[in-house]
Amino acid sequence: NKQDLERQAIAQERLAAIGRLTAGVAHEINNPLAGVLLALDTYRKTAGLRDREGQRSLELVERGLQQIRDTVSALLVECRLEPRNLTPADVDDLRVLVGADEAAQKRRIDWCCGLAGEVPVPATPVRQIILNLALNAVQAARENCLVRIEIKGRERWLRISVGDEGSPVDESVRDLLFEPFETRRTGGTGLGLWVTYETVRQLGGTLTVVARDDWTEFVARIPYLDRDEPPVAAVGS
């Protein structure tokens, strides 16, 4: 009987792990899909501007689909993709993806991109990190309040800072922010910050949170890959 109970406990733990993995993958796929659908809708409605706006929409669709492909491929042990570097165009994509969220249209979003060119960090997971943090801030911020998103290249690492004017975060809750299925938002899954934290950690970086009064800020620091030289940051960054 004891052995049967142990086997049942192990089976339940495995099922729970599969459930968390599936929910995490679904969470990551749904975010870029929203931007892809928005881009396709824009392309359909701007038949007279296909040379300029249509081309930009198609480029966004391509990068969004690449992000989905890389996210799913990461589950396949035998699959080895060569990651591409993050570019300013990826940040432009993220502006569109975040803008597709209904709540984002009721917030003041301030984007600050200090990248002068390619940055030697893998584009797909870093896009997910920025997107998750940005959407989390949009949901946490009050209407007509500020959400500030900064992406800057340093000497040997990338700094991502996302802050919002929202409800203060109690110190007792801060230790639970990166735990799976922990959420302060009604209808939330509690997976966004957990997936983000794990992704940052797998890239060898750190993710911290600073909360003071009505301002909450998440800061991710991700080291550059060794395969390339770090780019020079843009003036004013």
Image (cartoon, rainbow, N blue to C red):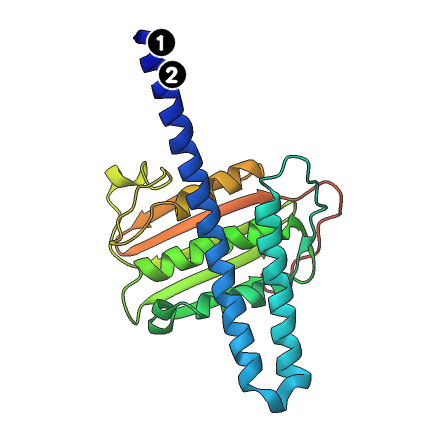
Residue 111, how many percent across, how many down?
49, 66
| Residue 17 visible | yes
* Outermost residue toward the bottom in this view: 48
Element marked by disc 2: helix
Q: Are marks 2 and 1 in contact (CB under 8 Å)?
A: yes
What residue sits right under mark 2 in the picture? Answer: 7
The image shows residue 236, relative to residue 184, as above or below, that is below
At label 2, counting other C-alpha atoms closer than 10 Å, the crowd grade (few under 14, some 14-19, many 20 or more) is few
What amino acid is found at the position of numbered circle 2 in the picture? Arg
Is 7 or 116 nearer to us in this picture? Answer: 7
Residue name at image x 56 percent, y 82 percent: 44
Q: Is residue 112 left or right of residue 233?
A: left
Q: Quadrant of residue 172?
A: top left
Residue name at image x 29 percent, y 50 percent: 212
Residue 74, how many percent across, how many down?
60, 42
Residue 87, how many percent across, how many down?
66, 60
Residue 191, how many percent across, how many down?
38, 45
Q: Is residue 67 left or right of residue 25?
A: right
* Outermost residue toward the top in this view: 2
Element marked by disc 1: helix
Residue name at image x 60 percent, y 74 percent: 57
At label 1, counting other C-alpha atoms closer than 10 Å, the crowd grade (few under 14, some 14-19, many 20 or more) is few
Give me the disc on residue 81. Answer: none
What residue sits right under mark 1 in the picture? Answer: 3
